[in-house]
Image (spheres, helix red, strand yellow):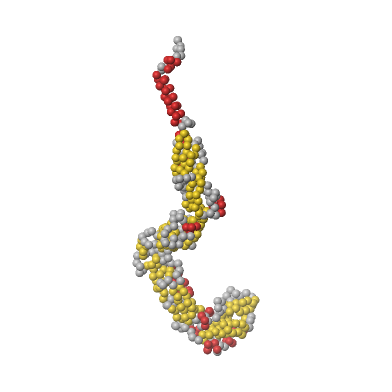
Amino acid sequence: MKKQFSLSRLFHHDKLMMAVSLVLAFVIWSLVVYGPSNLEEREITGVPVSITLNDYASQTLNLRIIEGGNATATVRVSGTRSAISKLTAQDISVTADTGNVINPGTYVLQLRTVSSGDYTIKNVVGDNGTNDTVTITCDVWREQAFPVEVEMPGLTVTDAEKFRFGTPSVSGAAITEGQVTVAGPKTDISRIARVVATIPDEASIAETAVFTADLQAVDQSGKGIESVSFLQAEDAKVSITVPVMVYRKVSLTPTLKNVPASYKGKADLVTITPSEVELWGVPSELEEYVASIQQQLVIDFDTLSPNTLSKEIKLEPAEGVRPLNGSETVKLTVNLKGVVSKTTEVLLEADSLTVTNCPAGFKVELAQVKLPSVLFCGNEADLNKLDLTKVRLTVDMAEKAAVGKQTVLARLSVLGADGVWVNYGTAAGIEVLVTVTATE
């Protein structure tokens, strides 16, 4: 027989009533805690403030925020516990109004924030802790190149009598021709007195070595300027090559070219002062430097005149090498007295031409009868008795045997005048016109 439903029996069912009581209690508690009539307030700190300069300031004026760009705010929100309990600083959007930023300077900016959820913004407090503003400072952003000076307080050479430091060289992606580009606010860039690369290592060395150095911009007092950075050197480090130089004494020997017959073998024809120079240099660079010195110690009679009987050569420091005293002047003196010069016209005879290296099957003859201007130099007595009918020309026709008239360079000599020479200037001879004919 089917039991009849009884409400009384249901209410007296202990286990069922216990379950219903628990459900009702949870519902009531939820309504009390999370119900729409139960609003709470919460303060959220460390909310990042988004500060973006307008296009005119950032692009046209090249302004940047140099202080206050990382400002944060404190925001008070209101809402149900369920709506605000899980809010974080990253969930709140706070911006600063930069519309009035149009010049370098310090600005107080109004903060703005809008709710992005089921809650209400009660207020926002900026970095001063009292009102809804933040303060920023803007300046024009500049980039400027500076030479890099090397400091190496901890380095020494193993033997100061044998070794010396050469000029250190700086290298790295940030370095162009010894300079580094510094970026930062115009105000701070203008304070830079120099940029130094300091080697922090302590070492005693006897040969060239490479170290890592730290870049820093400093002002006139030597204080570091931390607000600037180095382009392409975000870690502010560069590589420094420190050369170690050795001592060398070099004997100087002049080279004589195109010496007239009378002076060949003359022991004291040229005096060189000093006859020796002392150098400090990197071994790999010394030989080339010495060779370059010797190449300059040349007396060429083709360019010698009464006004050029002496010349001075200044030996400057080069990469990896320097004279003992920083620089040295070497003087070359041709020991000839009474040297004068004379410019004159020379008439040419057909038999005055001597041809060397003339290819077989060709004949070379003079095609002009005079040289309009020849500069003769020598002792005054020798020039006064110079017999111009004894002038001889010598031309080298190697690889020049083209049929017809052509201009070639000729060397001049005067029979019986071994102490006289011709000044050709920078040319290798005097231009003369010849005629080339084929004999076969």
Let me know if residue 79 appears in the view: yes
Which residue extends farthest top?
A: 1
Residue 433 sits in which quadrant? bottom right
Residue at x-position 44% and y-position 56%:
226
Which residue extends farthest front?
A: 130
Residue at x-position 40% and y-position 21%:
18
* Residue 406 vs residue 137, the one in the foreground: 137
Let me know if residue 194 appears in the view: no
The percent coordinates of residue 79 (x first, y second) are 48, 35
Quarter of the image where the C terminus is located:
bottom right
**20 displayed left or right of 419:** left
Residue 41 sits in which quadrant? top left
Residue at x-position 44% and y-position 74%:
328
The percent coordinates of residue 129 (x first, y second) are 44, 45
Residue at x-position 34% and y-position 67%:
159
* Residue 132 vs residue 190, the one in the foreground: 132
Is 27 above or below relative to 133?
A: above
User: How many numbered circles does the render carry?
Assistant: 0
The percent coordinates of residue 317 (x first, y second) are 45, 70
Is 289 above or below relative to 238?
A: below
**386 displayed left or right of 20:** right
Quarter of the image where the N terminus is located:
top left
The percent coordinates of residue 355 (x first, y second) are 58, 80
* Residue 29 vs residue 37, the one in the foreground: 37
Which residue extends farthest right?
A: 404
